[in-house]
Amino acid sequence: MPRCIPFANTAVKQAASLMLAAALGVFTAVQARAGDAPIMHVEKTATCGCCHAWVERMSAAGFEVRARDVTQDALTQMKIAMGITPETSSCHTAAIGGYVVEGHVPAADIRRLLAEAPAARGISVPGMPMGSPGMDFNDEREPYEVVLIGEDGALSTFSRHE
């Protein structure tokens, strides 16, 4: 199970938000040069095998993925800056097309997010449900939802997977 994100003080949140804004600006510039397909930037810890498996699934699904190993503290600060709460948190965080993608989100849902372009922060698969991409070991499965994170932080169901 992922660790809960500790809430940082306001100064730390503001600094992390500024770093995130600068990083997303770089991501957007890189995406514009890359052509039609946006590049997926993933931040994860080096020791998380399911994160590595999810990155492999996204690459196999046709996304250009640039993964970077960071410390747990750096990952936590990035999650806070991107509006990921303990309720929406998982083990890795990605940015693509101006959206955050948190956790074990299926490729089809990411494509739908990019195609529909809703006014939202992004989507998340909270926790680490068995059967989700990267958590698809053996035949073990559990139903899970992909949650849309609104610009105001409100949550709604984006899709359901049985």
Image: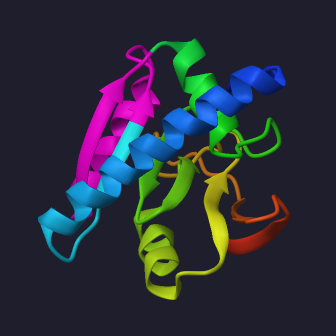
- Residue 136 seen from this side: no
Q: Which residues are magenta?
A: 43-70
Which quadrant of the structure image shows residue 58? bottom left
Is 92 on the left-hand or right-hand side of 159?
A: left
Q: Is residue 33 above or below residue 130?
A: below
* Magenta-span inclusion, residue 129: no
Looking at the picture, the colour scheme in use is rainbow
Corner quadrant of residue 79? top right
The vertical placement of 22 against 14, above or below, is below
> In which quadrant of the rendered image does the C terminus lie?
bottom right
Residue 2, position in %: x, y? 68, 26
Residue 32 rendering spot, x and y as whole percentages: 22, 67
Q: Residue at x 52, y 61 (%)?
A: 99
Q: Is residue 117 visible?
A: yes
Query: Taking 86 as reference, is 34 above or below it?
Result: below
Q: Whole-percent x and y of residue 36?
A: 20, 77
**How many numbered tags mark residues here?**
0
Q: Nearer the viewer, residue 102 or 118?
A: 118
- The quadrant in which the N terminus is found is top right
Relative horizontal placement of residue 37, taking residue 5 as reference (left or right): left
Which residue occupies 21% across, 64% down? 62
On the image, which quarter does residue 73 sit in? top right
Q: Is residue 142 left or right of residue 66?
A: right
Where in the figure is residue 34, as x and y percent of width and height? 14, 64
Q: Is residue 72 above or below residue 98?
A: above
Name the outermost residue toward the bottom: 116
Is 54 left, or right, of 104 in this rendering?
left
> Residue at point 74% right, 65% down?
151
Residue nearest the observer in this picture, 127 or 6? 6
Nearer the observer, 70 or 49: 70
